[in-house]
Amino acid sequence: MRAPTEGSAALATDTAMADRLRRRRFRHPTEAVIKALLTASGFVSLAATALILLVLFEGTLTFFQDVPLADFFLQTRWQPLFEPVSFGIWELVAGTANVVLWSLVVAVPFGLGAAIYLSEYANPSVRRVLKPLLEALAGVPTVVYAYFALTFITLDVLRPLLGDNISIFNSLGASIVMAVMILPTIASISEDAMTNVPRELREGAYALGATRLEVALRIVVPAALSGIIASILLAIARVVGETMIVAVAAGSTPNLTLSPLESIQTMTGYMLQIGLGDAERGTIKYESLFAVGAMLFMLTLVFNLGAHLFVRRFQERYE
Amino acid sequence: MTAVRPEAPGSDRYQGARERSRRNTLSAASRWFFLTAAALALLVLAVLAYDTISQGAGRLNLQFFTSYPSRFADQAGLRSSLIGSGWVLALTVVMAVPIAVGTAIWIEEFAPDNWFLTVIKLNLANLAGVPSIIYGVLGLAVFVRFAGMGPSILAGSLTLALMILPMTVIAAQEAIRQVPSGIRDGALALGATRWQAVRGQILPVALPGIVTGVILAIARAAGETASLIMIGAFTFIAFDNSRITDDFTTLPIQIYNWTTRPQEAFRANAAAAIIVLMVIVLAFNLIATIVRNRFRRFR
């Protein structure tokens, strides 16, 4: 931009130049076409969200024309497949909560332990090997974990150990394997947060005579807390949405319990059960899929959004 | 700690030394405790690998790859599920990758920075967290039922394409963002249009990162089970797929099928199929790592 003192001649040149520049955008006709194509592809993800919302909303609406809203939220029995039918969502929510609870009981101590080790103890060469190996756990297909939960953890370990106190299909086997699945999520994101804690905080504590353990637990963990919480929220979202492990190993008995020894059914487990049979369109079984799906969608959305908020908080603080 | 007595063993100095040594011992011990936590998950992975291989290796012969599913465990094989997986994955990639890369280019290079872009980005982040079974419900309602595709290869691929779209976009965005801005600015300063800069300068540099992201997304799709069962791919297929309108089944679905059979003999089949699936998934991951390390020009 030129200063206005240089006179009107310069201004005229600027206008001409601006004109030429504006025209230059159309020098290549392909440019406009490509830009339009790219913009269109940007809209596909919006369309996907819109479709998900539309499908869930429409199906849920149809469901609630047959089942009163109050029954869904106020009754406790989920018994859609045989008479007398009952559609209280809480048994399925309890099933999901059950698996969330027990998988966190296992995964949080070990995940945070692994994160602390990687961030505060490991030397760089160990870290370079260990971290990708841990993250590889997240790449194992869940149907493989499902097989492992049922055949190895439950049949080869838990049943011989606990006998008939634990049913063949149980929450514990599924939760233990689920914990292995979410461990990399917790360890990796927490470790990132811990590595982001400024060096000066650590060195200040060391200078005052703190040991490595004290620095880790009293300085680094509190300073990285929002990242740690974010990692746990993300892990919860993954457990809530995970289907194969619970469908194979946790059973298909809706059950209002937090006991790890009993057979249960989660929201996702029920949805897969309907998917396995061929529920005719228009039947109440088919419509219930959408109501449970909507509930599942909202739950995972809440946990994912929560994680985003916490992630942003720790990024703002230290970057 | 609290006792303050003048005599030697209980003196402040004595107590202080003991306290320090206790804290140091605790700290030294904690290293092994945390290492155990980190190593335990890998131990589980090792047990999983050992258990699967010892159960399934005996079933890995040529007949296992060339046979259709069967109700007799020792005659059943992976033929139709391998072919089905191949079809679905190929079609998924063809549909998802151009749109994903296009979206990433648009977001990083073309889109005006306003509230709408924020919405698009937030939406992508949330889509990446939507459980796969929800994509299955979407596929069932929209592709299978509403569009009348039935539980076909096409419906399955469309479902998986939508599922891997967000993660592929995010990976491609990362790759494009890592291109040094000097390259872009240089091209633009020399008079290149936006697209010329993207095609000639930015994409070639970002390509390894994009390819890595795409391969990881394929690995994820290769192991995907729930959404495909949801759209109705849990079926008995005893023919070779040849059209995108065919019914199909995939490798993970076959594993699920054999895992849930009550007969012990099918456990070996499930384990053998898991070995095959893990080899495929690990191969994808390995290729992704190699691409990332070999071809990354700028860091």
Image (tube, coloured by chain):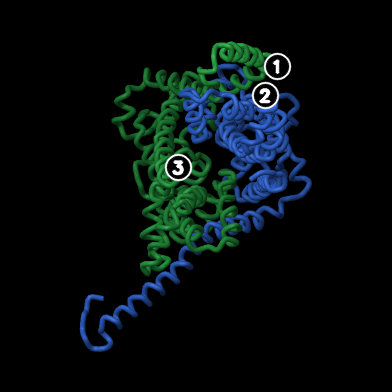
Chain colours: A green, B blue
- Helix, strand or loop at mark 3: helix
| B22 relative to B45 in the view: left or right | left
**Which quadrant: the N terminus of chain B?**
bottom left
* Comes first in the chain, label 3 or label 1: 1
Residue A163: numbered disc: none
Query: Do the residues at discs 1 and 2 belong to one chain?
Result: no
Q: Are marks 2 and 3 on the same chain?
A: no
**Residue A300: percent from left, percent from top:** 43, 35
For marks 2 and 3, give the CA distance: 37 Å
Left or right of B130: which side holds B225? right
Of residues A52 and A291, the one drawn nearer to the viewer in this rendering:
A52
Residue A218: image location, x then y, percent: 36, 60
Decide: few, some or many residues near mark 3? Use Cα within 10 Å; few <14, some 14-19, many ≥20.
many
- Of badges 2 and 3, the one in the foreground is 2
Q: Which residue lies under the disc numbered 2?
A: B195
Residue that mark 1 sits on: A30
Question: What residue is shown at x 44% (from left), y 31% (from top)?
Answer: A297
Quadrant of the image for the C terminus of chain B? top right
- Location of residue B99 (image quadrant): top right
| Crowdedness near tag 1: few (<14), some (14–19) or many (≥20) residues, C-alpha within 10 Å | few
Residue found farthest to the bottom: B7
**Where is mark 3, residue-wise?**
A234
Residue A301: x and y, percent?
43, 33
Amino acid under disc 1: Thr
Q: What residue type is disc 3 on?
A: Leu
Q: Residues within 10 Å of mark 2 (few under 14, many from 20)?
A: many
Measured from the top left, where is residue A259 in percent x and y?
A: 36, 49
Subunit under mark 3: A
- Chain containing mark 1: A
- Of the two numbered discs 3 and 1 in the rendering, the one whose residue sits closer to the viewer: 1
* Circles 3 and 1 in contact, beta carbons < 8 Å: no
